[in-house]
C-alpha cells in the first residue's frame, strides 16, 4: 500500500499552493482546451461548473459509458463463442475472469492513476481507448491460432483499457458540475452503460451470430476488428472534444468552499478512513455481483429445471431489471439523500440473496433477478460517496476504488467451487458474505458521515445567484466582495489597495 499510495504523489497539490495561485473563472475552464496536458496542481476554474456548462462533456462521456457497456455485453457473448470453439472448461473460464479483472488490480493504482494525475482526463480517456483497441485487435491472432493463452492475454489488455477508462470516466462524471448532483450524474450515466450491456447480447444472438456454427470464429474475428476500429475512432473524437479539466487543485478549492456546511478539514490520505472502507466495500460488492452474474444461468437451470436457453432468457430479464433499477435510483436521488438510497438498495440485496438461497423453482429465479435490480445503484453510489471530501486526493482515491473492481477475479471462482461441492443455492452464501461487508458501508455513512455528505448535497456551488453568476466562481465572489465594500462605503481605489 505504501508504494502504490505514493505512486504519483508529487502530482497532488499542497493546500497552500492552491490558494496562492490565480483563480480562473468557469468560463475560462470551458474555453481552455488542454490538448497536451494539464497540471494537476493548478486551478482551471472547473470547481464551479454550472449544469449548463457540464451538459455537453457529461453527454459525451455518457455516450462512452453506453458504448463501453455495449462492448462489455458483447464481450460476454464473444467469450462464450471462444470457450465453445476451444473446448474451454469451467475451471479455465474462471481463469478468463481472473485475467480480465486482474487488470483492474494493476492499472488504476499504478499507470492509469498516474496518467490521470499527470496529464488529465482527456489523455486518460484516449489512452484507455487505445489500450482497449489494441486488446480487441489481439483477438484476431488468438482466433486464428485458437490459443487459450492468447485469449487470456487479449482479455487482460482489454481489462487494462477499460480499467483506465474507469479511472477517468467515473471521477470525471462525479466532479464535472455542481457537487450536490454528483451521485445523480454518475448514476444516470451508468444507467446508459447498463442499457448497452442489455442490448449487446440480444443483437449478437439475433444479428451478428444468427447463422453461424458454434465453433466458427470468423464472425468473432471481424466483430473484434470492428470494435477496435470504432474505439480508435472514438479516441480521435475525444482528442478534439471540448472537455474541461477538473484537477485535484479544483477539488481542494471546492472542498474548502463547502467546509462551512460539511465540516471539511484537509487531511493526509492515510487518514481518509471513509475512502478505505469504501474500497473494501467496493471490492466485496463487485466480487459478489460478478459471482451472482457468473452463476445466474446455472442457478436457474438447477432451481427451475429449465434449459440453458430458457435460463439465458431469465438472465436477460434480470439484466433489464438492473438497467431499470439504475434509472429508478437516479430519479430517487433527486428527492432522497443518496446515502439513504444506498442503504435501501443494499437492504434489498441482502433480503433477496437470502431468499434466493432458500427458495426453489421459478420463485428462486425471481428472487435472484430482484437481487440484480437492487444491485443496480450500488457501484456508482459507493464510488461517489467514497470520494466526497477527498479534496486534493480525489483522483488518487478514485483510482483505488476502481482498483477494487478486481474483486471480480476472486468471488466467481469461490462461488463455483462451493457449487461444485454442494449446489448453486448454497453457493450463493459466497456472494452473501461479500454483500454483507458492502452492507456495512451505508450503515457507516448514515451514522458517522451524515453531516459531511448532507453538507455537499446542500451546497449551491455551480448554481446561479440572483445576478446570474455561478456560486463558487471567482466572478461571483468578486461581485459579492464589491457589494460588501459598497455597503461599507469603501471606494474602488480603497478596495484595490486593501485587496
Image: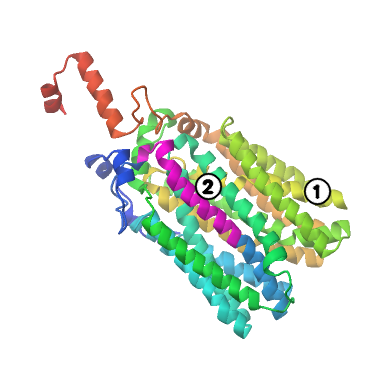
User: Which is nearer the eye, 318 or 379?
Assistant: 318
Q: Residues within 10 Å of mark 1 (few under 14, many from 20)?
A: many
Say whether residue 54 is magenta: yes
SS for dot 2? helix
Q: Residue at x 61, y 55 (%)?
A: 196
Q: Residue at x 56, y 43 (%)?
A: 188
* Residue 330 screen position, x and y as percent: 59, 39
| For residue 122, above or below residue 481 | below
Name the quarter where the N terminus is drawn: bottom left
* Residue 369 screen position, x and y as percent: 75, 49
- Which residue is under mark 2? 383
* Residue 10 screen position, x and y as percent: 31, 56
Picture quadrant where residue 152 is located: bottom right
Q: Residues within 10 Å of mark 2 (few under 14, many from 20)?
A: many
* Residue 316 screen position, x and y as percent: 73, 55
SS for dot 1? helix
Tell me if I can see residue 367 in this picture: yes
Q: Is 327 on the left or on the right of 469, as rendered? A: right
Q: Is 316 on the left or on the right of 240, as rendered? A: right
| For residue 473, above or below residue 74 | above
Q: Which mark is residue 184?
A: none
Q: Which residues are magenta?
A: 47-71
Tell me if I can see residue 4 in this picture: no
In the rendered image, the residue lying farthest to the bottom is 145
Give how far apart the Cα atoms at labels 2 and 1 are. Answer: 28 Å
Instruction: Point out the frontmost of discs 2 and 1.
Output: 1
Label 2 with label 1: CB-CB less than 8 Å: no
- Which residue is under mark 1? 366
Amino acid at each position: 500500500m505504501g508504494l502504490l499510495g505514493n505512486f504519483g504523489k508529487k502530482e497532488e497539490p499542497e493546500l497552500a499552493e492552491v490558494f496562492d495561485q490565480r483563480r480562473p473563472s468557469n468560463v475560462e475552464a470551458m474555453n481552455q482546451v488542454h490538448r497536451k496536458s494539464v497540471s494537476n496542481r493548478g486551478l482551471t476554474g472547473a470547481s464551479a461548473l454550472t449544469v449548463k456548462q457540464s451538459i455537453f462533456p457529461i453527454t459525451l462521456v455518457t455516450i462512452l459509458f453506453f458504448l463501453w457497456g455495449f462492448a462489455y455485453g458483447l464481450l460476454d457473448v464473444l467469450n462464450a463463442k471462444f470457450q465453445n470453439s476451444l473446448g474451454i472448461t469451467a475451471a479455465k473460464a474462471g481463469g478468463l475472469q481472473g485475467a480480465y479483472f486482474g487488470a483492474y488490480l494493476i492499472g488504476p493504482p499504478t499507470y492509469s492513476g498516474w496518467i490521470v494525475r499527470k496529464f488529465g482526463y482527456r489523455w486518460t480517456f484516449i489512452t484507455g481507448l487505445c489500450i482497449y483497441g489494441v486488446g480487441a485487435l489481439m483477438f484476431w491472432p488468438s482466433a486464428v491460432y485458437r490459443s487459450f493463452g492468447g485469449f487470456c492475454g487479449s482479455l487482460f489488455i482489454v481489462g487494462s483499457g477499460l480499467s483506465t477508462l474507469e479511472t477517468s470516466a467515473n471521477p470525471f462524471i462525479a466532479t464535472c458540475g455542481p457537487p450536490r448532483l454528483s451521485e445523480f450524474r454518475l448514476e444516470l450515466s451508468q444507467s446508459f452503460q447498463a442499457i448497452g450491456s442489455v442490448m449487446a447480447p440480444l443483437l449478437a444472438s439475433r444479428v451478428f451470430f444468427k447463422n453461424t456454427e458454434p465453433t466458427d470464429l470468423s464472425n468473432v474475428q471481424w466483430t473484434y476488428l470492428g470494435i477496435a476500429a470504432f474505439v480508435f475512432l472514438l479516441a480521435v473524437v475525444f482528442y478534439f472534444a471540448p472537455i474541461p479539466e477538473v484537477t485535484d487543485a479544483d477539488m481542494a478549492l471546492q472542498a474548502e468552499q463547502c467546509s462551512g456546511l460539511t465540516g471539511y478539514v484537509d487531511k493526509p490520505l492515510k487518514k481518509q478512513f471513509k475512502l478505505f472502507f469504501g474500497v473494501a466495500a467496493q471490492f466485496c460488492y463487485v466480487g459478489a455481483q460478478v459471482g451472482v452474474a457468473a452463476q445466474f444461468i446455472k442457478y436457474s437451470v438447477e432451481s427451475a429445471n429449465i434449459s440453458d436457453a430458457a435460463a439465458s432468457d431469465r438472465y436477460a430479464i434480470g439484466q433489464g431489471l438492473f438497467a431499470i433499477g439504475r434509472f429508478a435510483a437516479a430519479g430517487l436521488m433527486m428527492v432522497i439523500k443518496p446515502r439513504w438510497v444506498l442503504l435501501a438498495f443494499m437492504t434489498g440485496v441482502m433480503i433477496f440473496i437470502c431468499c434466493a438461497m432458500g427458495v426453489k423453482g421459478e420463485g428462486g429465479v425471481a428472487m435472484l433477478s430482484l437481487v440484480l435490480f437492487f444491485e443496480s445503484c450500488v457501484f456508482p453510489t459507493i464510488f461517489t460517496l467514497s470520494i466526497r471530501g477527498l479534496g486534493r486526493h480525489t483522483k488518487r482515491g478514485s483510482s483505488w476504488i476502481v482498483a477494487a473492481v478486481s474483486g471480480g477475479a476472486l468471488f466467481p471462482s469461490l462461488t463455483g467451487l462451493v457449487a461444485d461441492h454442494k449446489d448453486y443455492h448454497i453457493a450463493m452464501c459466497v456472494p452473501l458474505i461479500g454483500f454483507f461487508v458492502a452492507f456495512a458501508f451505508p450503515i457507516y455513512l448514515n451514522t458517522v458521515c451524515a453531516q459531511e455528505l448532507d453538507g455537499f448535497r446542500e451546497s449551491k456551488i455551480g448554481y446561479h445567484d440572483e445576478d446570474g453568476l455561478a456560486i463558487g466562481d471567482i466572478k461571483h465572489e468578486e461581485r459579492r466582495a464589491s457589494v460588501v465594500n459598497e455597503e461599507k462605503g469603501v471606494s474602488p481605489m480603497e478596495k484595490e489597495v486593501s485587496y
